[in-house]
Image: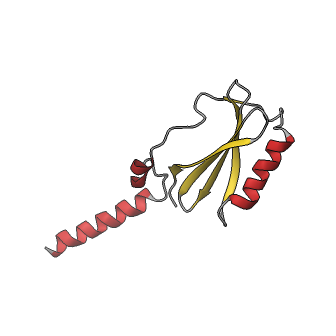
Amino acid sequence: MNLTRISLCISLVALVCSTGCIPVAVHPMQVFSRHSNPIEGWKSVNFKEKPSPAIEKDYHDFLNYERPPGFVGAIIGYLEDGNGNHAISIEIGNNGTYRTCVLIYDRNDKRIRKVKYISGHYGC
């Protein structure tokens, strides 16, 4: 009996030590956070074509004032839909969760929509 218990404990410790720090493919809570991508089908715009000053000021204001404290954001895309609308996609990671914020602008560079959703998870 004791030999079985000891071998089980050793196996468990070996399993935990061997997996280490790996990315989590599907987080259990992700089942409840399914969403549609608001910029699916939009084309990426090269950042050599800078966003207009109004869009640039707006997303800088978003990063400075609207993000939760302690979060670090990274702009991961400047997109357009072919109808004159533009979007900025910002990914924010903290405490094992990636959140994406999409700021959508009309032809006049006025923000018309802000979408926030959980886009993934990571280990450690």
- Residue 73 appears in which quarter of the rendering? bottom right
Q: Quadrant of the N terminus?
A: bottom left
Label count reads: 0
**Residue 51 x %, y %:** 81, 38
Q: Residue at x 48, y 54 (%)?
A: 22
**Residue at (31%, 65%) from the top-left corner?**
12
From the viewer's perspective, is 57 left or right of 115?
Answer: right
Residue 60 vertical position relative to residue 7 in the rendered view, above or below: above
Horizontal side of 37 relative to 108 (left or right) equals left
Looking at this view, name the residue that lies furthest to the left.
Answer: 1
Q: How is the image coloured?
A: secondary structure
Spot the residue most to the top. 82
Q: Residue furthest right?
A: 53
From the viewer's perspective, tell me whether residue 122 is left or right of residue 92. left
Q: Quadrant of residue 44?
A: top right
Residue that appears at 70% across and 24% down: 82
Relative height, residue 82 to residue 13 (above, below): above
Q: Residue at x 39, y 48 (%)?
A: 31
Give left or right: position of 76 versus 109.
left
Residue 123: x and y, percent?
A: 50, 57
Q: Which sits in the foreground, 96 or 63?
A: 63
Where is residue 43? Give x, y as percent.
67, 28
- For the view shown, which residue lies furthest in the bottom direction? 2
Where residue 7 appears, as percent x and y from the top left, is 24, 67
